[in-house]
Image: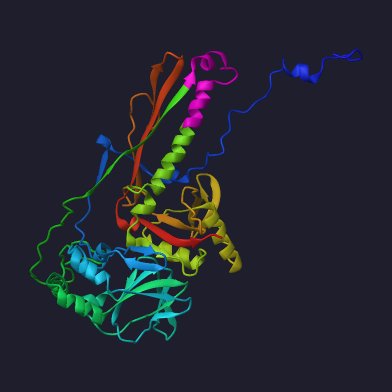
Amino acid sequence: MTDDQLSLSTAAARNLATTTKSVPQMQEITSRHLLRVLPWVQAIGGVYRVNRRLTYAVGDGRVTFTSTGAEVRVIPGELAELPALRGFDDQEALAALAGRFTQREVQPGETIVESGTPRDSVVLIAHGKVRKVAQGAYDNETVLGVLADGDYLGEQILVGVDGQWEFTATAVTACTVLTLSAQALAEVRGNSDALHARLENAANWDGHAQNAFGEAAIALAAGHVGEARLPGTFVDYELAPRQYELSVAQTILRVHSRVADLYNEPMNQTEQQLRLTIEALRERQEDELVNNKEFGLLHNADLKQRVHTRSGPPTPDDMDELLSKVWKDPAVFLAHPRAIAAFARECNARGLYPSNTDHGGQSVPAWRGIPVLPCNKIPVSDRGVTSIMAMRLGEANQGVIGLHRTGLPDEYQPGLSVRFMGINDQAVISYLVTTYYSAAVLVPDALGILESVEVG
């Protein structure tokens, strides 16, 4: 205190004052829209089984490649993803077949196959994006789709179906493709009895009676008159349906007893520690529901339900294409905030201004009346590429559901428990924080993915 000071300084007064303070803040907390929109279903016993009608696999997978420097080769076993080779496991024959593919570098705008020319090769797309274009009904060009890494063309020649290309395939970006000529195929086939027998059987296979979705058909009669003989039928089920086991996220929260005893005013320290721990646990839960390789939505979308952007950025045309994959009662789009911004730029460039819609009392962006919700758990690659998800929700709609288990011992929130673990000899109190969860796609067309979305 100086000689001329007449009153208490603010620095000294502050030591005696009660400040107005916030609870601890945490930047990691997000809106977690995925956790909010998923209908949560009880998984009694920790397992949820998805029973479906029997579906015949037709070999619609993607082919994987390896690279050494600039040289790209197809993994022999991955050729079994082609329809005619589905389940074929003769590694010697597959290796011989893989060794006959030749690499070709294609520049943007270059034609890979041309409509009307003989279909005389199998083409595997190792890297890049390819657009399929055909002649439309009114003599205009029609874009049939976009292919990308792992897709293929001309697989019909494996079973001896020649003919002509029905479309033109043009490189949108720089591409690396591997081609197998019909002559090379014939040479490998002539040297392998197993391969010859397999392709011969594939060519003669009439298939099982099935509907447009690959499910075992149910025989019905309609439009008949009189005493027509009615067909008999039954609904066949998958013999080995998929089962989803609940995953777990856990941590041990530690609080020193001195902190819990002495520093609980004006806010409870243990409560705040627990609140922030649960927030982090919920963030991790949403991340797992998106990215986990066992049950994450990005990894469990059917390959037929994946589409690629036509040019790079997400355009209105791309969003409509994605919507066509989930056309039965679509409920929501989920996209990284940068992808939403990129879509808004594309709309602005076209003079389109999509209206917002109400979602949970908030006004959110929408496309075709369906909310487009941000989800920062959808990854953006180093190249500025991400994905957009569209889904149908709920058990009644055969959609996407979340799985959890409520009624846990010491349950703190639905599906989340906090158990007291005791105090150790260092006077540290421990709590076990646990939540169980998973997600299930009840039928393949409940989830669609728009891939190769550029956000830069």
Residue 264 lies left or right of residue 3; in this view the side is left
Report the residue at 50% width, 51% height from top: 373
Residue 424 vs residue 97, the one in the foreground: 97
In the rendered image, the vertical position of residue 89 relative to residue 15, given as above or below: below
Measured as percent of width and height from the top left, residue 447 is found at: 37, 56
How many numbered callouts?
A: 0
Query: Which segment is the magenta one?
Result: 255-277
Residue 22 location, quadrant:
top right
Measured as percent of width and height from the top left, residue 30 is found at: 52, 42
Residue 79 lies left or right of residue 380; in this view the side is left
Residue 212 vs residue 131, the one in the foreground: 131
* Residue 257 painted magenta: yes
* Residue 7 painted magenta: no
Report the residue at 52% width, 16% height from top: 260
| Residue 314 showing in the rendered view | yes
- Looking at the magenta stretch, what is its main secondary structure? helix
Residue 179 lies left or right of residue 256; in this view the side is left
The scheme the figure's colours follow is rainbow
In the rendered image, the vertical position of residue 65 relative to residue 44, given as above or below: below
Residue 138 vs residue 56, the one in the foreground: 56
Measured as percent of width and height from the top left, residue 372 is found at: 50, 54
Measured as percent of width and height from the top left, residue 117 is found at: 33, 87
